[in-house]
Amino acid sequence: MRIILNFMRSYRSLHLTLFINLIFINFLWAQTTSEWRALPKMPEGKWEPGVINFENKLYLFGGYKEGVISSKRSEYFDPSNLEWTQIQELPSAITHMNMVLDKRTVWFAGGFKDGYKGHAIAEVWNYDIDLDRYTAAPLLPEPRAGGGLALAGRELHYFGGLKLDRDTDASDHWVLNLDDWEMGTAEWEDSTAMPTPRNQFSTVVFQDEIYAIGGQFNHDTQQLDQPRVDIFNPKDNAWRSGPELPKGHSHAEGATFVHDNQIWMIGGHTTPTGGSKSQDRDILTLAADGQWEKVGELPIPLSSPAAAIINDILYVGGGASGGSSVQANFWMWPLP
């Protein structure tokens, strides 16, 4: 019996030592290198998912799982234990939708149920993180996919994107008041139209203004990437031009976010001046009153990956490489 107890104590001690060593190695690696480190692959490859960074966890909703077949699967990654946890599936298998966070509720609108003509939807939902439950909200006035969604104050804004034919860009800009939603009287209302209609642009709220970054003209025809940046001021109800990207750019919706008073945009598609469309590996940042700067590169070029910065480490996963090949690779990179 004493031999067994000694063995159990040694076993626990060994595992504790290994655990402490793992933490130390990860800490030392993060402090001494600026190189990418490959993590275990994601449970399912995801291309063009909805993405949220909440309480130091990376949430992924839907996305293409293969080809242009959409997925309902949703989950989050916890860097503290390097584990993925599956959550309630989406009500619809969708992609091409932005996600925004309102306290402990995630909102999303429109999207594609698979990637075909006629598959754009007008559905609007919110996801209660604590209850792990989805609730339907008022439909968009028309089906849309690949548009921008942003929360400014208590107003949810949807603008741009593709119409049902999967090729016509829309300039419509609609607003839903969330205080009215809580009172049960919410309806989408018209706002100032997007000045240059396009799709698959990145959307963030930065210094209380809404940014529409890059994007492309059309989808099934030319897919022409744009360097244009438009900024909407909710107080003035007006758009103005922002700092242009160094090249035409799209397909980074789930990998564009605000961190440390800068906009970050990771990967996507690009069409340099005089060049042809290709997948991108650049990491770009924009500071207030500044210009876009390249601060790094991905391990491989990626279209529409998921990305977030958590505890000064950039996590990037999924996306498509080599055309439309969905991949499940997952990496971490300490900020330089």
Image (tube, helix red, strand yellow):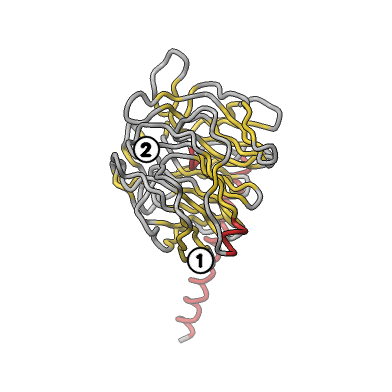
Point out residue 238 in the picture as x, y percentages from the top left corner: 64, 34
Query: Is residue 193 or residue 151 the one in the foreground?
Result: 193
Q: Residue at x 56, y 56 (%)?
A: 21
| Residue 210, numbered label | none
Q: Residue at x 38, y 26 (%)?
A: 223
Is residue 124 depicted above or below 335 in this figure?
below
Name the quarter where the N terminus is drawn.
bottom left
User: Element type at marker 1?
Assistant: helix
Quadrant hosting residue 290: top right
Point out residue 198 in the picture as x, y percentages from the top left corner: 46, 30
Left or right: residue 6 compared with residue 276: right
Left or right: residue 205 compared with residue 289: left
Residue 300 shows in the view: no
**Residue neighbourhood size for the residue with mark 1, other residues' Cα within 10 Å, grouped as few (<14), some (14–19), many (≥20):** few
Check disc 2 and give the amino acid type: Ala
Q: Which residue is mark 1?
A: 15
Q: Residue at x 70, y 41 (%)?
A: 235
| Residue 320, numbered label | 2
